[in-house]
Image (cartoon, helix red, strand yellow):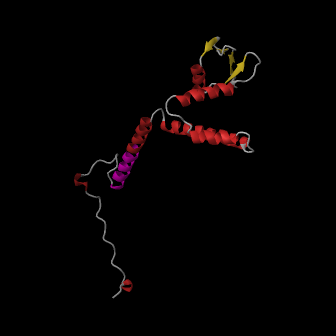
Amino acid sequence: MTTERIIKKYPNRRLYDTELSRYITIADVRDLVMSGVPFRVLDTANDADLTRSILLQIMLEEEAGGEPLFSANMLAQIIRFYGGTLQGVFARYMEHSLEAFATQQKQLADAWGDTPFDAINRMTKRNMDLWADAQKTLLRAAGLGPNDPPRDGCEPDAVAAPPPPPDEGDRRD
């Protein structure tokens, strides 16, 4: 069972990590998010849960720097769901969709390994193994299996007899 790390927010807007016993920054909280560490941010004045507002602040900073994740149109559509009859349905839909996306992303990362090059290396090795097995099978079928010594001139042991002539009743004139 994982326990949530408690971060306290003081009136001077400083964040205090109770596990590390030191003040931390929003960037440190972002690192907790990226590492998958469960946490809650509590207001020291009244123990109100401020986790969502801190996460929104992190998102705002992320959106302001670099390439944004949300377009203005997407944000406007999300805002339109507030107060509507489908707000709860939309929230659950978004949560489940993001969970499914994260699960698929993890499965892909597990399948590919640390880098795409790891996956390419594994596929190349597997293809080489398959090719080697196919060659061995072909050589065995030709009577030149890996345990068989090569024959002089690669001549077959016996000459196959020609097929019998067709029956006279099968002939069509």
Indicate left or right for 149 with 1 as reference: left
Which residue reaches farthest right? 46
In the image shown, does 51 or 84 lie closer to the viewer? 84
Left or right, 97 with respect to 137, comes to right
Q: Main secondary structure of the magenta part?
A: helix
Q: Is residue 44 visible?
A: yes
Would residue 97 be visible to someone looking at this image?
A: no
Residue at the (55%, 31%) spot, across then down: 63
- Quarter holding the C terminus? bottom left
- Quarter location, residue 71: top right
Relative image position of residue 96 (x, y in whole percent): 66, 41
Q: Between residues 90 and 155, which one lies in front from this camera angle?
A: 90
Q: Is residue 10 above or below residue 32?
A: above
- Residue furthest toward the bottom? 173
Residue at (73, 43) in percent of width and height:
84
Q: Toward the viewer: 83 or 150? A: 83
Q: Determine the residue positioned at 59% across, 20% down.
A: 26
Q: Height in image: 44 above or below 34? A: above
Up/down of 132 relative to 7, above or below: below
Q: Considering the image in quadrants, where does the N terminus appear?
A: top right
- Write down the quadrant of residue 72 in the picture: top right
Q: Is residue 149 above or below residue 25?
A: below
Span shown in magenta? 129-142
- Number of numbered tags placed on the structure image: 0
Residue 59 in percent (x, y) is at 59, 29
The question of residue 131 being in magenta is answered with: yes
Q: Position of residue 155 (x, y in %)?
A: 25, 57
